[in-house]
Image: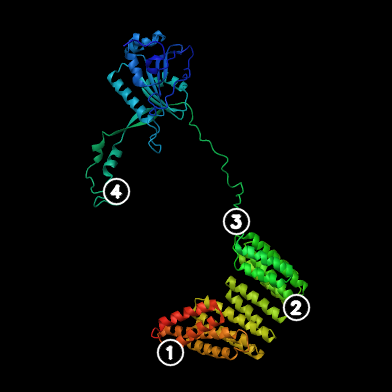
Amino acid sequence: MAPRRGGEGGAGALAAIGGGRGAFDPPPLKRMYPWQQDGAGQCDIVAGGVDDTGVFKGIHISGVHLMALLRTFQLSKVFMPVDTSTPIAHLGQSLQDGIPLVIVTRGCFGRDMDYGPGPVRNDVQKTVWEICRQMRADMPQVLISCIDLPINVSPDVVQACLSEPLNEYRELMYHEGTWHTPSVINSSGLAKWKQENKKEKLNKVGVMPGGFHRKKFGWLDETVFYKDMWALGWKPVLKRSDPPAAPRRTDLVFSENAVPGVKPILNSTPSGTEVTFRKLLARSRESGDPKELVSSVKAYLDRAKFSEKSGLEEAVKACGEAAELFEGRGDAVEACSATGMAVGTYIWMNEVDKAMHIATEMQASAKTVKVEVKAARLVLDCHFALGELDKAVEAATSAKDSVQKKGDPEALCEAWGLVVATEIARGDFEAAVTAATSATSSADKLSKAKAWLLVAESQMALGGNSESEATKKSAYEAAIAAQTSARVLFKELGLKKEEAEALQGVVQACLMQGDSTAALQTATELQAFAKDAEGSTEGMSVLAATASQLVATAHLQQYSINGAFLEGGGEAMIAAAREAVASFDRLGEAGRRAGAQRVLLQVRRAFPSTN
C-alpha cells in the first residue's frame, strides 16, 4: 500500500507539540461527525511528561479513537504524514522505555445514579478504561493513566495529574473540585442481602405480593460464604476546591407577591332569557308602571343564570327604578319590596357588600315602622349570607329596641320575630323561647296571636334539636298549647285562614310528638273547618287538601308504630291520600301535588290490598 501523503494522517488525529509554557493549549477546532452517536471519537490522549523546569514535553492529541491511535503507534515512520514532527515518530518505540500516556474521557463515571440509561458513549468510554486495565496487566512497563473529567471542565485540569501526588495513581476521576481514585470495598453484606431477597416471578405459587418471602434461617454465620465479594468504589485523594453551590433562585417568592386574580371566561353572547328580559324592561320603562318593572324582574330572576352578570346588574337597576316610582306614588311598602328584590339579587350574585349597603341605607332612611322592620330583615339576610350570626343577633335586637319605642304592636311583633329567627339560626333555642314568650305580653290580640305562633315555632325547634326525650316531650306539648292559644285568638278576631293555619300547626306538633290519634282528630277537624269556609275565605281550598294529606300521614305514622290503622282503617287512609292528590291537581299546585303523591305511594305500600 502506498504511503499517505499530506492531510491529517494518524487515523484522523490532530497533533500539537507542546510549547514552552507550563500549561496545555486548548484543543484546536476539529471536524465533527454527526453520524457518530457513540462518542467513539471523543478521547483525549496526552503523551509525554514534565521536566525539571516544570515544562511539559510531549504531545496532546484530542478527538481521536483509542484503537486508531494505538494502531498508529504500531506503524513505521514511512506511514506517518510527511509534515509530522520527528518526536511523534519515536513515540511508539519510546513506549517501551516508560513514556507516560494519559487517556482522558469525558463524563464516563459519576452518572450511574442518574435516571435513565444515559448516552451510549458512557458504555464506550467504560470499555476504553477496561482495555487500558488489560494493557497495564499485559505490559506493566507501559505507563498508561486514565482520567475522567466532566464535560464542562477545561483540559488545563489534566496538568495536575503530571505532578505529585496525582502522578502516583493510574486511574483518576475529577468530580466537583476533588480528585478520586478507584477503591475496592468488601461487599459481603450486600451479596448476602441479594441472595436472601431474590426477585421471584409474580405468578409463582406461594410467593407473597410484597416480593419478599423468607423460607429459611441460617444456623451459622453466613458472612464467611461471601467474604470474597468485592465492589469497586471511589475515594477522594486530593481536594482542589469546594463543590460548587447550586444557585438559589430568588424569583420564587410567592408570599410577597399578591395572588393574581383569575378572571372568569365571559360569554359575550346573551341568552334568550336575557334578551327577552331587556325587551320587557324597555316596554315597562316606556309605560312607566313600576308593577310591570317588578314583574319583568321576577320573571327574569326565575330563569337567570349566575354567569349573566350584565343581565343581573340590569335587574338590580330596574328594581331601584321601580322603588323610586313606588315612593313617588306614596307606596312605601311596595318600594321596600322592590328594594328587597335588589338586595336578594346582589346576595345571589355573591356581592353581599353591595346588598348590605343598600339594606343599611334603606333602614336608616325608613319613614314608617313597617319599612324599618322590613329593612332590618334585609340586613339580617346579608349577615346570614356572610355567616355572621352574632352580628345578626345584635342587629335584630337593635331593630327590636328601636321599634319598641314607637308604639306599633304589629311592627313590634315582627321585630320580635326577627330576634326569634336569629336565635334559632344561631342554635340558642332557649333564648328563642324566651324572646317569643316576651312577645306574648302585647295587649293587641292580633300581635299576641302571632307571638304565640313564635312560641310554637321556637318550641318546635327546641324539641327537634334536643337529645333528651323529656325535653322533646315538654317542648312539643308547649308548642301544641301555643298553637291552641293562637287559634283561640284568631277565632275571636274572625280570621278563619289564620285559625286554620294554627290548627295545621297543632297537627304537625302532634305528629312530631308521636301522638297519631290526636293528630288524626285535629286533622279531621281542620278538614271539616276548611271545607266549610272554602267558599268564603281565600286559600281555604289549599288548606282542605293539606288536611286530607295530614289525615293520611297520621294513619301511616300509626301503622309504622304498631302495624295497625286508626279509626276508619286503611280505606279511610287511601281515600284521604287520593283526595289530597286530586285537590292539589285541581288547584294547580304542582309542588304540593308532588308531596301528596309521595304520601299516596307510601299509603299504597302499607295498604296494598286496595286497587
Question: Label 3 vs label 1: CA separation?
Answer: 60 Å
- Residue 595 is situated, as x and y percent measured from the top left of the image, at 50, 78
Query: Mark 1 falls on what kind of element?
Result: helix
Instruction: List the residue tagged with mark 4.
Output: 212
290 displayed left or right of 525: right
Q: Earlier in the sequence, mark 3 or mark 4?
A: 4
51 displayed left or right of 224: right
Tell me which amino acid carries mark 4: Phe
Instruction: List the residue tagged with mark 2.
Output: 406
Camera-nearest label, 3 or 1: 3
The residue under the point 22% across, 45% down is 219
Question: Label 1 vs label 4: CA separation?
Answer: 70 Å
Pointer 3: residues within 10 angstroms few (<14), some, or many (20+)?
few
Please give the label number shown on residue 267: 3
- Position above or below: 64 against 463: above
Q: Are marks 3 and 1 in contact (CB under 8 Å)?
A: no
- Residue 140 is situated, as x and y percent measured from the top left of the image, at 30, 18
Residue 362 visible within the image: no
Question: Label 2 vs label 3: CA separation?
Answer: 51 Å
